[in-house]
Image (cartoon, grey):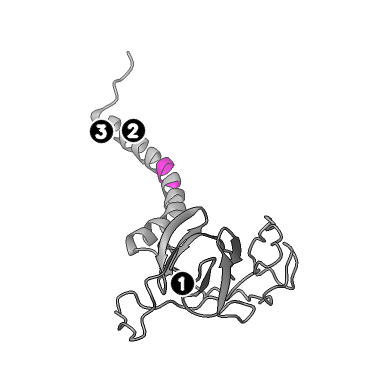
Amino acid sequence: MARQPSEAALRAQKDAKQKKLLIILIVPFIALLAWQGPKMFKALQGGSPPPPTSAVPAIPTTSVPSGTPTLPGTGSDQGGVLPDSDLQPDLLDGQLLSFSRFSGRDPFVRESPSSSAQPAARATIEVNGSSEDVRVNDPFPASDPTFKLVSVTDTAAVIGLVSGSFSNGDDTITINVGETLVLAADDGTRYAIKIVSVAS
């Protein structure tokens, strides 16, 4: 009859198995610790500070004299800006290509009335399809006060810029009743101005 192992022998076998299992499991644990340890350490420490941001270099711009047409993709430096591929139609004879625009007046500063007040003359002016009644010396259009009505006659209206002058050097332009004049700003904004009617 086979002899039963003693309790001490069973315990020794069990301890030996546990030691072997511990040795087998400790190898992947050390590998995992070596692989994930630095990431865990950085996470616990809050990570490294973000690298300092470098200043973005300014993009050089080239100025084009007013009245000189340019084609997309031409010029010495595009400055990383996509060219405008939509060519604008040619202006008709008597229409300005562009005008200069300066900063407008402060709308919260009230201007004192002039002693030599103009008569209550007005004109109905259409700008880009929207018409409004404008009195002499009032700016228009209401959505973007760029121009002002300088004076009116029985057949025409004289307009100017709220500030600055047109690219041809004139301070004002005369537009006949029923005539449409297209003006293009330096930033490419176009204004189709039509004098619908005048009243002096």
**Disc on the earlier residue, 1 or 2:** 2
Contact? badges 1 and 2 (CB < 8 Å): no
The residue indicated by pointer 3 is 8
Mark 3 is on which residue type? Ala
On the image, the x and y values in percent for residue 143 come to: 41, 61
Q: Secondary structure at mark 2?
A: helix
Label 1 or label 3, whichever lies nearer to me, is 1
Check residue 148 in the rendering and tell me which mark sits there, or answer none: 1
> Looking at numbered disc 2 in the image, what kind of residue is underneath it?
Gln
Magenta region: which residues?
23-27
* Within-10-Å neighbours for mark 2: few <14, some 14–19, many 20+: few
- In the image, is residue 99 above or below residue 176? below
Residue 111 x, y percent position in the rendering: 32, 81
Q: Which residue is mark 2?
A: 13
Q: Confirm whether residue 48 shows in the render.
A: no
Residue 41 visible here: yes
Query: Between disc 1 and disc 3, whose residue precedes?
Result: 3
Residue at the image position 74 percent from the left and 71 percent from the top = 75
Question: Residue at left 36%, top 58%?
Answer: 43
Apparent side of residue 111 relative to residue 51 in the rendered image (left or right): left
Residue located 24% across and 29% down the image: 7
Q: Residue at x 40, y 39 (%)?
A: 20
Query: For the residue marked with disc 1, what is the amino acid?
Result: Lys
* Main secondary structure found in the magenta portion: helix
**Could you tell me how far apart the alpha carbons at marks 2 and 3 are, in whole angstroms?**
9 Å
Q: Nearer the viewer, residue 51 or 186?
A: 186
N-terminal of the two: label 2 or label 3? 3
Label 1: state its secondary structure: strand
Quadrant position of the N terminus in the picture:
top left
Distance between the alpha carbons at the discs numbered 1 and 2: 105 Å
Question: Could you give the CA–CA distance between mark 1 and mark 3, rounded to whole angstroms?
Answer: 110 Å
